[in-house]
Amino acid sequence: MENVITRHRHELKRRTLTVQATERLTPHMIRVTLGGEELEGFTSLGADDHIKLFFPGAEADKPEMRDYTPRRHDAKAGTLVLDFATHDAGPATAWAEAAVPGDTLRIGGPRGSAVIAPVFDWYLLIGDETALPAIGRRVEELPAGVTAITLAAVPGPEDEQRFESAAAQEAHWLHRPVAEAHEPEALLEAARGLALPEGRGFVWIAAEARVARALKLHFLDERGHPAPWLKAAGYWVKGDAGSSDKALD
């Protein structure tokens, strides 16, 4: 079976950007638009790329770092959009809640991009609030002639989002309390109830590490989905602030 993911390396560079605008998309999601001269040369080829964001820490020489997905990059306009899920009390949430035009944010990366070959008939994208930026970007970037199936867990209907895309869309939303975001049962049950289309499909999963692992095993072991056509990541780990588990890939 062919390798459908191509990995690209980028020059690792830190940039200081300026807040141009902020918007509360939903009760648990804030959008921040950044810009500035240092954005020139920024490259993000994959919908689930990650950049490092640097926030002031308890010690001046040791900033707090968090991984975030570039939600949208417009090189011509010189803007970078980041969406912040505000379901924790960490430094990223605190910064996004207080951000106003003129504030600055230091970023690094992305170090690389994983690009999925355009050889699939459908894409299944599953995740929680933290995965919505990557899910939304992927759906919006898909072309006509393919189907984007999304399954996302959020606190309530007011947290649902709409994505514009040339692709056909089939959206599924699961509502559960934020306090249960680390429990796999609800998303797992919803995934079991999905009827997948015929043809070649790519499955992408991102959530709390235990949730993502359970979903990955469901598709590989219970559904028999080809492993090279699946990518899973633990975007966060309950009880370990700032950690992730990319080994799920």
Image: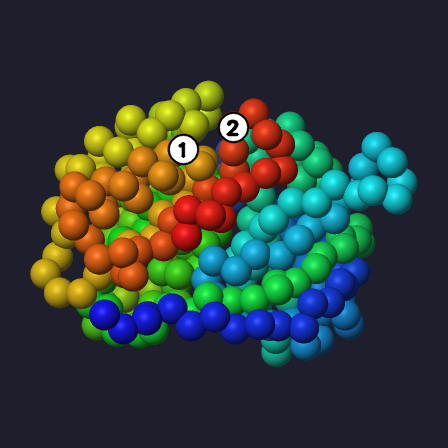
**Real-space CA distance between mark 2 and mark 1, rounded to the nearest whole angstrom:** 9 Å
Q: Left or right: where does residue 205 sit relative to residue 190?
A: right
Q: Residue furthest right?
A: 60
Q: Secondary structure at mark 2?
A: loop
Tell me which residue sits at (57%, 72%) in the image.
Answer: 9
Quick check: 181 above or below 124? above
Residue sitting nearer the eye, 188 or 169: 188
Q: Which residue is mark 1?
A: 210
Pointer 1: residues within 10 angstroms few (<14), some, or many (20+)?
Answer: some
For the point 29% across and 61% down, the residue is 228
Q: Quadrant of residue 93?
A: top right
Kind of residue at disc 1: Arg
Instruction: Determine the image quadrant of residue 211.
Output: top left
Question: Which residue is disc 2 drawn over?
Answer: 238
Question: Looking at numbered disc 2 in the image, what kind of residue is underneath it?
Answer: Lys
In primary-sequence order, the first of circles 2 and 1 is 1
Q: Quadrant of residue 163?
A: bottom left
Residue 146 in the image: x percent, y percent?
Answer: 23, 68
**Residue at image x 89%, y 40%?**
60
User: Is 137 in front, or is 228?
Assistant: 228
Horizontal side of 37 relative to 79 (left or right) equals right
